Amino acid sequence: MTRVTVKRKAHFNAAHRLFRADWDDQKNLEVFGKCSYPNYHGHNYDLIVSVTGAIDPETGFVIDLKVLKDLIKEEIEDHFDHKNLNEDLPEFKNLNPTAENICVVIYNKLKSRLDTKFDLEITLYETARNFVTYSGT
């Protein structure tokens, strides 16, 4: 069976602060640097959603990219865009919104909506040079 990966790129802007409430400001600054400043900071996140599966012999698609586009908009862009991750999103109430944790949250939100026949990989760019990838393992 031929398996192909299709990818969709998306974008959202969000603010966050990296810190642990159980640490004092000095310890947070030592570990998280400027990212721990109390007034938050923002990123222009780029997201690549990769879906791998068999090519449907009737349509020639792995997944209809319009369906994937709408899913990403609903679950990720509408949910994350122009939000303060620490303050506005329940997922980060007790989870430090590092790029790694954001990537896993995005994966879980999308994976729960995709057919189980698909493999999913998420790549999240926090900056042009800093990015993380998660595929559920």
Image: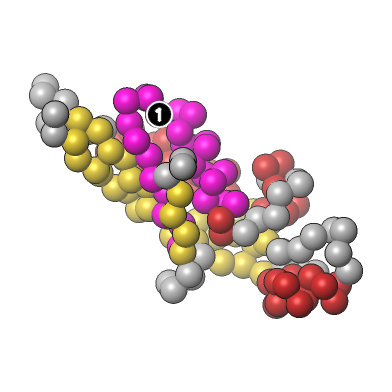
Identify which residue, 10 or 114, lies in the foreground: 114
Q: Residue at x 25, y 33 (%)?
A: 53
Q: Determine the residue located farthest toward the front in the rendered image.
A: 137
In the rendered image, is residue 81 in sight? no
Highlighted magenta segment, given as a residue range: 101-125
- Image: 129 above or below 97: below
Residue 40 pos. (x, y %): 72, 67
Name the residue at 19% across, 40% down: 4
Identify the residue under disc 1. 114
Where does the N terminus fall, quadrant-wise? top left
Number of on-image labels: 1
- Give me the residue at 20% from left, 30% from top: 54
Residue 69 placed where, x, y %? Answer: 36, 41
Q: Is 7 placed left or right of 112 in the picture?
A: left
Is residue 131 at least partly visible in the picture? Answer: yes
Magenta span contains residue 70: no
The answer to which quarter of the image holds residue 128 is: bottom left
Establish if 124 lies above or below 38: above
Of 128 and 30, nearer the camera is 30
The residue at the point 45 percent across, 33 percent down is 111
Residue 59 in picture, x, y percent from top left: 14, 26
Q: What percent of the width, then of the height, locates residue 49?
A: 37, 47
- Vertical side of 55 occupied by 5: above or below: below
Provide the secondary structure element on which disc 1 rests. Answer: loop
Q: How is the image coloured?
A: secondary structure
Q: Nearer the viewer, residue 73 or 104?
A: 104
Name the amino acid, label 1: Leu
Q: Residues within 10 Å of mark 1 (few under 14, many from 20)?
A: some
Q: Is residue 121 in the magenta section?
A: yes
In the image: residue 118, left or right of residue 22:
left
Q: Quadrant of residue 43?
A: bottom right
